[in-house]
Image (cartoon, rainbow, N blue to C red):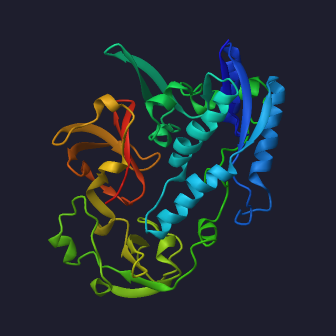
């Protein structure tokens, strides 16, 4: 009998994943990952991980499977939290959920599971995997979940072939409504529990409060760039983000730190009296300036292309990796739940250039771009420009 360690998060998805694996004849062990101790920045007095841990335990008891809690907070701080602070301080916008899967769930957690004699680890992600044979060798494919509204393949865009070989995604072929029905029929306490919101390791949190633990407030200027600024005529806005200066616009307010803001952000600017909302179109942590444009159609919000440096590239399907000068048509997304966008990717000496058929809104350095062929996620990378 194959042994599977399931990451029980205290939510309905992982609960049903465990239930289905038992039905399929696996020996199942439930493990709750405790990733964060500090509750100073959470919105309510409730400790989110304690509540989730209790629910995970109740699910394990209902399913009659062994259960334990694994404290990964030290690894989390080193691999995720410190990374987040460094990225925001550099003026980039990280995605901790993607890193959580690459560095924790399918690395540290996977190692812990294997030490328990597991053959696989399983999660409640809405994605699928299958395998094909290429030149006599098994190759694993990461596929989008059947429920297109819940598809979470994007969050797995940095996993490798070894990690996929050890991963099971028991609910990837189901719609969310089907998952809840299974939970109800199995009388699981999580059947009607709301999906978690917020950062993957903290729960509900005020991001500025969290960042202020290490990144101190620093007053700077908010500069509005008019949409008819000649800079937009001079630039074709290829993969390079436009470089603004304070004399390109007018000061309309002040902020408490450029590192707290990201491209496309609307809330938190505190500037009124405009006929349309202001959006962040650029940040400069060196001068501590934020540049904004009025209206969601402001040209500063859109770009036709982005660039990924070679050392930030990752191919889930290594056999499909491009050599210099080669191109490929793909569908791409630059954020979770964004509809897939038609694009061409071209490998150059220094990295990968992605050119979209339609201009993309709010491309932010530090985020992940992931590209697909059909339903298969084949590669990804950190946006550098």
Q: Position of residue 209 (x, y in %)?
A: 64, 70
54 or 138, nearer to the observer:
138
Residue under the image location 53 percent in, 38 percent down = 150
Q: Position of residue 76 (x, y in %)?
A: 62, 51
Residue under the image location 37 percent in, 17 percent down = 137
| Vertical comparison of 184 with 47: above or below | above
Q: Position of residue 280 (x, y in %)?
A: 41, 71
Q: Which part of the image, by quadrant, shows the C terminus?
A: bottom left
Q: Quadrant of residue 328?
A: top left
Residue 146 in view: no
Q: Position of residue 121 (x, y in %)?
A: 62, 28
Residue under the image location 68 percent in, 12 percent down = 25
| Vertical comparison of 111 with 254: above or below | above
Residue under the image location 50 percent in, 53 percent down = 95
Relative to 254, 60 lies left or right: right
Q: Which part of the image, by quadrant, shows the N terminus?
A: top right
| Vertical comparison of 235 with 329: above or below | below
């Amino acid at each position: 009998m194959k042994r599977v360690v399931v990451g029980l998060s205290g939510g309905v998805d992982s609960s049903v994943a465990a239930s289905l694996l038992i039905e399929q004849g696996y020996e199942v062990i439930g493990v709750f990952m405790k990733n964060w101790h500090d509750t100073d920045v959470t919105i309510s007095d409730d400790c989110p991980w304690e509540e989730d841990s209790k629910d995970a335990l109740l699910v394990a008891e209902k399913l009659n499977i062994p259960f334990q809690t694994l404290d990964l907070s030290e690894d989390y701080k080193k691999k995720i939290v410190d990374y987040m602070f460094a990225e925001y301080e550099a003026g980039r916008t990280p995605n901790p959920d993607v890193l959580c899967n690459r560095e924790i769930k399918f690395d540290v957690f996977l190692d812990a599971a294997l030490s328990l004699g597991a053959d696989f680890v399983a999660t409640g992600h809405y994605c699928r995997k299958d395998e094909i044979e290429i030149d006599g060798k098994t190759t694993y494919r990461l596929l989008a979940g059947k429920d297109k509204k819940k598809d979470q393949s994007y969050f797995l865009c940095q996993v490798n072939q070894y990690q996929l070989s050890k991963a099971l995604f028991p609910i990837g072929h189901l719609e969310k409504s089907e998952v809840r029905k299974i939970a109800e029929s199995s009388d699981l306490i999580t059947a009607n529990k709301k999906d978690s919101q917020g950062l993957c390791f903290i729960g509900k949190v005020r991001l500025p409060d969290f960042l202020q633990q290490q990144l101190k407030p620093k007053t700077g200027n908010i500069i509005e760039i008019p949409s008819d600024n000649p800079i937009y005529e001079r630039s074709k806005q290829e993969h390079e983000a436009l470089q603004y200066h304070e004399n390109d616009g007018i000061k309309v307010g002040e902020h408490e730190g450029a590192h707290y803001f990201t491209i496309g952000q609307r809330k938190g600017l505190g500037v009124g009296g405009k006929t349309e909302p202001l959006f962040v179109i650029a940040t400069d942590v060196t001068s501590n300036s934020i540049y904004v444009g009025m209206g969601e159609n402001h040209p500063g919000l859109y770009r036709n292309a982005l660039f990924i440096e070679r050392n930030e590239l990752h191919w889930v399907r290594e056999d499909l990796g491009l050599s210099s000068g080669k191109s490929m048509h793909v569908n791409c997304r630059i954020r979770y739940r964004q509809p897939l966008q038609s694009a061409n990717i071209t490998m150059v000496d220094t990295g990968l250039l992605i050119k979209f058929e339609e201009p993309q809104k709010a491309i932010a350095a530090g985020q992940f771009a992931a590209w697909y062929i059909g339903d298969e996620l084949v590669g990804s990378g950190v946006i550098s420009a």
